[in-house]
Image (tube, rainbow, N blue to C red):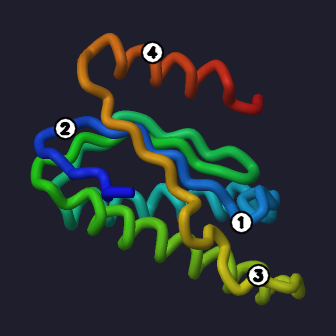
Amino acid sequence: MARARIQAPATYAITLRCLYRKLLLTPFAPTLHAWILYFLAEAVRRTGAILHHITIEPNHIHYVITVTDANLPTLKRLFHGEVGSFVKKALERHGFEAPELVFGSGRTEQKQLVNGAAILTWLHYSDIKAVK
């Protein structure tokens, strides 16, 4: 199967799932969530992307982003890599057995949102599906 061509500027909905859908994003949630936001902000700053929305669930993350250059793979590598490394270290530091991979290969789903209606629909979906 051919890899998706990254277009720019374009808006994408990204879903990043934990390996085996484990609830790895819940331990120490306030601190963990703050670091997730920091890592995303840093990836956005380094790539020049525009962040529209993020939802952090216990076992996955949804975010909507517009890339201004065709550098979505770079952004994902920076963000996903830092979050995965942080989660592993946090689990180990608190006495839990950390998995070899937090997200694993093939755990990212991305959809190009082709117009304003698609963007609004995805933002609405992401907002109402969040665990309160």
SS state under label 4? helix
User: How far across and down, in percent of the image, does residue 58 sit?
Assistant: 75, 50
SS state under label 3? loop
Would you name the residue on which mark 3 appears? Answer: 99
Name the N-terminal-most of marks 3 and 2: 2
Q: Is residue 15 left or right of residue 98?
A: left
User: How far across and down, in percent of the image, does residue 59 sit?
Assistant: 73, 53
Q: Amino acid at mark 2?
A: Ala
Name the N-terminal-most of marks 3 and 4: 3
In three-dimensional space, the C-alpha distance between marks 3 and 1, rounded to whole angstroms, equals: 9 Å
Q: Is residue 127 left or right of residue 122?
A: right
Would you name the residue on which mark 2 appears? Answer: 10
Name the N-terminal-most of marks 4 and 1: 1
Viewer-closest of 37 and 100: 100
Quadrant of the rendered structure where residue 26 is? bottom right
SS state under label 2? strand
Name the N-terminal-most of marks 2 and 4: 2
User: How far across and down, in percent of the image, does residue 106 sit?
Assistant: 54, 63
